[in-house]
Amino acid sequence: MPDYPIYRDPPEQCRTPDAEERSLWGRTLERIADHCRARSLFVLHYCTGCGAIELPPSMTSRFDLERVGMQPMVTPRQADLLLITGYLSVKTLKRVILTYEQMQGPKYVMGFGSCTINGGMYWNSYATVKRLDQYLPVDMYIAGCMPRPEAIQQAFLQLMEKIDSGRAQNWKEYYRRYDHYLGEQQALFGEQFHTPTDVIGEARHYSLFGPETLGEHTAKLAKYDLYHPGQGAVDALEVKR
Amino acid sequence: MSKSLPTPLEGVFRRVPGVRWRQQAERHLRVELSEAENLPALLALLKGEAGYRHLSAISCVDWPDADEFELVYHLDSYTTQVLISAHIRLPAAPGRYVSVSGLYRPAGFFERDIHEMFGVQFEGALDLRPFILTEWGGPPPMRKSFDTEGYVRDHYQWVDYGPEWLAELEKRGGGIVE
């Protein structure tokens, strides 16, 4: 018998937390994380619409976004908040979806101006998308054509408050109801539409796999053998709950 | 406003049959050709003899009552410094014309655009694949016969907006006028 103490793994005096306690811990940590997230938002602008012109005044010295912890970010993979500043044509929506899917969770989307709400002044244009929330989960809209920097500032503060209190959970909906969103996208772009992002795999990774993640629309992806080349697409899309 | 043409233009117009011209502004001529097939000859002569090296744009107008498309070729010359807009008319069916991309290479883009927006076929064009409307499956959208609102109704959804103050307004006989 050695004269030094032997540590077992796990040590006997530690108890294993039960499921309820574990979830309570998880929620507490998430709450703290949300508190921090709300104060450090990296913003990715999708500036194809006229809303882009209202952002420089919001960012520069007069209104100064940096004092509330927001900064522009150049790549989707490092951004938290996607700003859709203005109208989206059918063609740019495709790029927006791709951009959104590249962002890491938790991620937030903000629709800017009346164009993202109802098409705005492009309400009868054949090439302009009318409702952004049909294709992506939107956390907040700013009404106006265009919203002034004061309104933008107000919306950012409201979004921060929403994130802080844990109510900005829409990004989870994209995983839980991926089939619904993909269906809307396919209705616009054609049945063969898909992105190279493995949304279903991510849903599993984040434990956000819901009953509506897979469905009739995702079934159409099966023939493309997208995410696990060689293994067979059906394997990759099988339902694991 | 001067009424006399620059010398090289006079010679060109005399040699192409069915040319009528009208001075729009001091340095802008509107040229109409009664026979559409004479246009490539006119362009070739303008380019060769009057220095019209620059094709600014080709535009298209749909005239649904006459069942015709009007093509307008805008040309500019650094020699004469007079802008020429050459107008021709084509029957809407079958809506075919020849490409002038052999003469002016930038015409390829304008023709591709017009083909996409109006459905005019250009024989011998460089490329007539979809250009801007890559996601488009419907009829050519710039034709007058295209029902934009009907298309929007069929393909998009709107958010219903019925706030209380509007309902109150409508009760009193006001509201949104359709």
Image: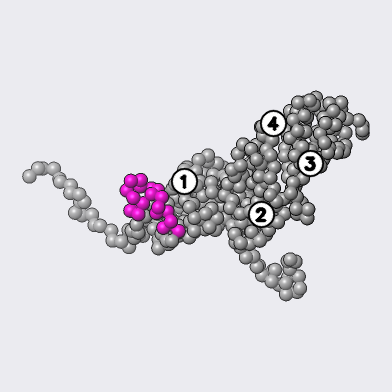
- Kindly identify which chain the residue marked by label 2 belongs to: A
- Disc on the earlier residue, 4 or 3: 3
> What residue type is disc 4 on?
Leu
What residue is at 56 percent from the left and 52 percent from the top? Answer: A110
- Kindly identify which chain the residue marked by label 4 belongs to: B
**Left or right: A50 in relation to B12:** left
- Kindly identify which chain the residue marked by label 3 belongs to: B
Indicate whether residue B105 is drawn in magenta: no
Q: Which mark is residue A102?
A: 1
How far apart marks 4 and 1 lie (CA) works out to 46 Å
Which label lies toward us, 2 or 4? 4
Where is residue B88? Give x, y as percent: 77, 42
How far apart marks 3 and 1 lie (CA) works out to 56 Å
Tags 3 and 1 both on a single chain: no
Where is residue B129? Give x, y as percent: 59, 43
Q: Is residue B99 above or below residue A20?
A: above
> What residue type is disc 1 on?
Gln
Label 2 crowd bin: few (<14), some (14–19), many (20+), radius 10 Å = some
Q: Are marks 2 and 1 in contact (CB under 8 Å)?
A: no
Label 4 crowd bin: few (<14), some (14–19), many (20+), radius 10 Å = some
Quadrant housing residue B151? bottom right
Q: Which mark is residue A186?
A: none
Q: How many marks?
A: 4
Looking at the picture, tell me which residue is in the foreground, A227 or B121: B121
Q: Which mark is residue B35?
A: 3
What residue is at 53 percent from the left and 41 percent from the top? Answer: A73
How far apart marks 4 and 3 lie (CA) works out to 19 Å
Kind of element beneath mark 1: helix
